[in-house]
Amino acid sequence: MSLRDQLTGDLKTALKSSDETRKGTLRLLLAALKQAEIDKRPAGALDEGEVLAVIQKEAKSRRESIADAQRANRADLVAMNETELHVIESYLPKQLTREELVELARAAIAETGAGGPQQMGAVMKLLTPRTKGRADGRLVSDVVRELLSL
């Protein structure tokens, strides 16, 4: 079953169970997927990687909205976006912990033979595909920078 089919099926379940939060969030995700397909034309349907990228983009958008709402002292918006983020994250692959990321980064540094911050690009080039979809790029960059600075 594809991720898009799972979203559609879960939307039907949410409609039947009158789960308003889940229903609204799934509709937003499906609308974002539809917009991505329209933007991609004439190529047509999105593959699984592209569907996952759209879902990750929506999750990142919610995280940014939470940060903005916290700065504005809007607890109502923080709560709403956190609830939506929780639903969205249930469709993403398990995120790497910082410890797992450090292990992967150390392996990439060893493979490239990087000895300092000036070789960060080579390490990131090797590490980014390995962490795609499972870790935030900023966190990956911070870990690599930290390890190369030691």
Image (tube, rainbow, N blue to C red):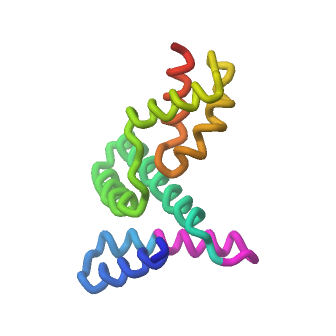
In percent of the image, x 61 and y 29: which residue is there? Answer: 111
Q: Nearer the viewer, residue 130 or 87?
A: 130
Q: Residue furthest front?
A: 111
Q: Nearer the viewer, residue 125 or 16?
A: 125
In percent of the image, x 56 and y 59: which residue is there? Answer: 53
In percent of the image, x 54 and y 41: which residue is there? Answer: 137
Magenta-highlighted residues: 29-44
The x and y percentages for residue 149 are: 55, 15
Whether residue 53 is in magenta: the answer is no
The x and y percentages for residue 113 are: 64, 22
Q: Is residue 143 above or below residue 88?
A: above
Q: Residue furthest top?
A: 150
In percent of the image, x 38 and y 39: which residue is there? Answer: 97
Q: Residue furthest right?
A: 42
Q: Is residue 2 above or below residue 12?
A: above
Number of marks in the image? 0
Q: Residue furthest left?
A: 17
- Magenta-colored segment: predominant secondary structure: helix
Q: Is residue 124 above or below residue 70?
A: above
Image quarter where the N terminus lies is bottom left
The x and y percentages for residue 24 are: 37, 72
The x and y percentages for residue 16 are: 27, 86
